[in-house]
Image (cartoon, rainbow, N blue to C red):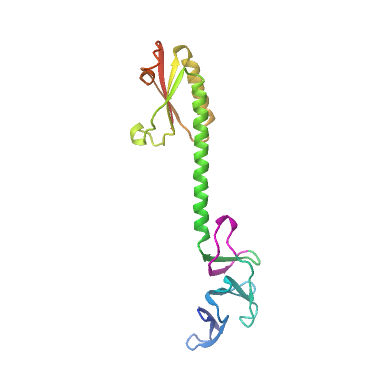
Amino acid sequence: MSVTLLVGTRKGLFQLHSDDRRSWQLEGPTLEGWDVFHAIVDPRDRTLYAAANTFPYGGTVQRSTDMGKTWERAEEIGLPEETELKLEKVWHVRPGREPGELWLGAAPGAQFFLRKKFDKALDAEVASIIAMSVAHSHGCLAARARETAQIKLQTPAEHGRPEVMIMNVACLVDKAAAGEFKRTLAQLRTEFAAQGLVYELTGPWPAYHFVSSGREGLADAAASDQ
């Protein structure tokens, strides 16, 4: 059975042919002047592809339909615009699943930078959702209270729950309005259940967060959103 090995070098692409895998016949180089990092024969149509790089053209893919006798260079290969990266080298080429589809390995690694950019955008989106959820929750609770006071957020070790605390607020509530305040909190629990927010109500506590107000007959209810 005849075997052909494709050998990419800085001097181009060589082919080694053998009928018995003991003695080999060297052919080439083709693509002289190109650094060939990888080459492969597409089993779908026997087209030869080479990941080739050179100073004038940069990284590209060379294509041959006659096993290296003639070559056609791919034009305008680049990384996706969203990566904001410039293609430096093409180091791997592999036939895809669909007709005419090729997968390329290139430098810099676009997938890594895309993932990094995606994670950064995701973090920003999560932060925006949290900020809107906190603002909405605080506004609803403040509408049922005389006063509110933002309290320092606690760590899971401090508040004893696995969730991350995103809001910690003390609310000064009239005793007569305590029922409406609790119903508002229950509505918030239902509204944000799908987002994974957990509301915990503690108290009533002495109104030590509002000692400057001088008011009496008020219950201090602390509501925390985790």
Q: Pinpoint residue 65: horizontal percent, then vertical percent.
A: 65, 77
**Quarter of image, res 60:** bottom right
Asked if the magenta segment contains residue 44, the reply would be no
Q: Is residue 16 above or below residue 200?
A: below
Q: Is residue 206 above or below residue 127?
A: above
Q: Is residue 209 above or below residue 54?
A: above
Q: Pinpoint residue 94: horizontal percent, then vertical percent.
A: 56, 68
Quarter of the image that includes the N terminus = bottom right
**Quarter of image, res 69:** bottom right
Q: Is 68 or 24 nearer to us in this picture?
A: 68
Please report the residue visible at 39 percent of the width from the left and 28 percent of the height from the top.
151
Is 189 situated left or right of 81 in this image? left
Q: Is 80 or 196 nearer to us in this picture?
A: 80
Is 140 situated left or right of 167 in this image? right
The range drawn in magenta is 78-97
Q: Can residue 78 be seen at all in this image of the molecule?
A: yes
Asked if the magenta segment contains residue 95, the reply would be yes
Is 36 situated left or right of 69 in this image? left
Please report the residue visible at 59 percent of the width from the left and 59 percent of the height from the top.
80
Q: Pinpoint residue 148: horizontal percent, then vertical percent.
A: 44, 22
Q: Pinpoint residue 162: horizontal percent, then vertical percent.
A: 39, 37
**Quarter of image, res 150:** top left
Quarter of the image that includes the C terminus = top left
Please report the residue visible at 54 percent of the width from the left and 83 percent of the height from the top.
15
